[in-house]
Amino acid sequence: MLSVLYAGFQDATLVQALFFGIKAAVLAIVIQAVIRIGKRALKNAYMYALAATAFIAIFFFAVPFPVVILTAGLIGLLGRHLDPDRFVVIKGHDTPEDAGRAIDAMMNGGAAHHTQATRKRAFKVLAIWLPLWFTPLVVLAMALGYDNVFTQIGLFFSKLAVVTFGGAYSVLAYMAQEAVQNYGWLAPGEMLDGLGMAETTPGPLIQVVQYVGFMGAFRDSGSLDPFTAGILASVLATWVTFVPCFVWIFLGAPYVETLRGNQAVSAALSAVTAAVVGAMLNLAIWFAVHVAFGEVDTIRAFGMQWLVPTWGSIQIASVVLALGAFIAILRFKVGMLPVIFVSALLGIAYYLLFGGAPVL
């Protein structure tokens, strides 16, 4: 519903004013998430180095997020042999004694038979969930062709579902990079607006995939009505994002107890989590630059890229709002929704008083 309203009324002054305030608050929320996860994951120099390397790889060299995650996992596996005490940051939790006895009794009595890992069970899970995941993609590719926007949306968000380590914040920068720069489904400002919508609505932040899919098909609807195409694409994006989750849950859950104390897995996950902090920092800086400046160029040279804002386009009001939201969240522990609500009201008030978002 929000995507439909946004596509139809994004040029309205009230809508622009609303998102002007929301985006500043969301920037503070993203920075808080980086700090929170960083404190938990970056326990030593190795983890700091992994986070810094991941940030440099994504921010300056546009290395795809899946490659960064895979590389970090391999480094963690190697580091476990070199220095296990420092590479195993994420450790399993001890099961309470009473709970352990209850679980053992269930296992011995056959009450937990459905949790046993067997080859037959794995094949049954794959036989059910893989067709549910891939059948729409095969049908779309055969009916519309590989280059059609619906096929591309289905394939891209399927790939995103495979590498969603560390939650939505970690993949949002990758999603933004692909959706804005490679596919051209959205403009940078529209991606920021989508994140603002996702933060202000119930449900997981990753539901921003609905909005990205909607806007992609809305812009390239072919023979369909743009709004119809957008709604169909948002359903498709949601389907291929969440169906793989059930594959991982039903296929992997029986192995969780076995793997919980595995040092190799813990080392790999520790390294991946550190890399996720670097990916989130990339998102925070990308977000901050686009919130603070009305015009931002991407310069590419010598195999590198970097963001170059036009200093004359700085939006002082956005910067002040973001700083206020950041202080409210971090210093005074104000909840996310009140901060977003107040920021939205201040954004509207600023537009009403000054007739827009003038730059310095």
Image (cartoon, rainbow, N blue to C red):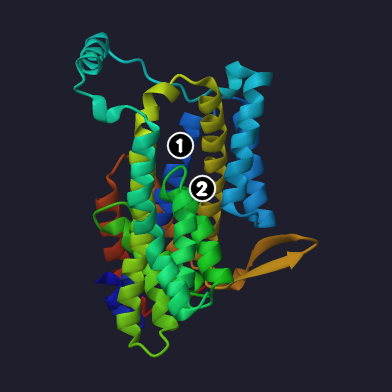
Instruction: Look at the picture and state if 220 lies above or below 240.
Output: below
Amino acid carrying mark 1 in the image: Ile
Which image quarter: residue 64?
bottom right
Residue at position x 47%, y 55% in the image: 160
Instruction: Look at the picture and state if 334 lies above or below 91.
Output: below
Question: Residue 354, how many percent across, how many down?
Answer: 37, 77
Q: Which comes before the other along the chain, label 1 or label 2?
A: 1
Residue at position x 77%, y 60% in the image: 303
Amino acid carrying mark 2 in the image: Met
- In this rendered view, identify the residue nearer to me: 117 or 181: 117
Q: Is residue 49 visible?
A: yes
Q: Is residue 189 visible?
A: no
Which image quarter: residue 300?
bottom right
Q: Residues within 10 Å of mark 1 (few under 14, many from 20)?
A: some
The residue indicated by pointer 2 is: 280
Give the farthest residue toward the right. 302
- In this rendered view, identify the residue nearer to me: 161 or 103: 103
Task: Report if the CB atoms under discs 1 and 2 are less than 8 Å apart.
Answer: yes
Residue at mark 1 to residue at mark 2: CA–CA distance: 9 Å
Q: Secondary structure at mark 2?
A: helix
Assign the N terminus to one quadrant of the image: bottom left
Q: Which mark is residue 242?
A: none
Q: Secondary structure at mark 1?
A: helix
Residue at position x 70%, y 61% in the image: 305
The residue indicated by pointer 1 is: 37
Which image quarter: residue 139?
bottom left
- Please state if 206 lies on the left or on the right of 291 as rendered: left
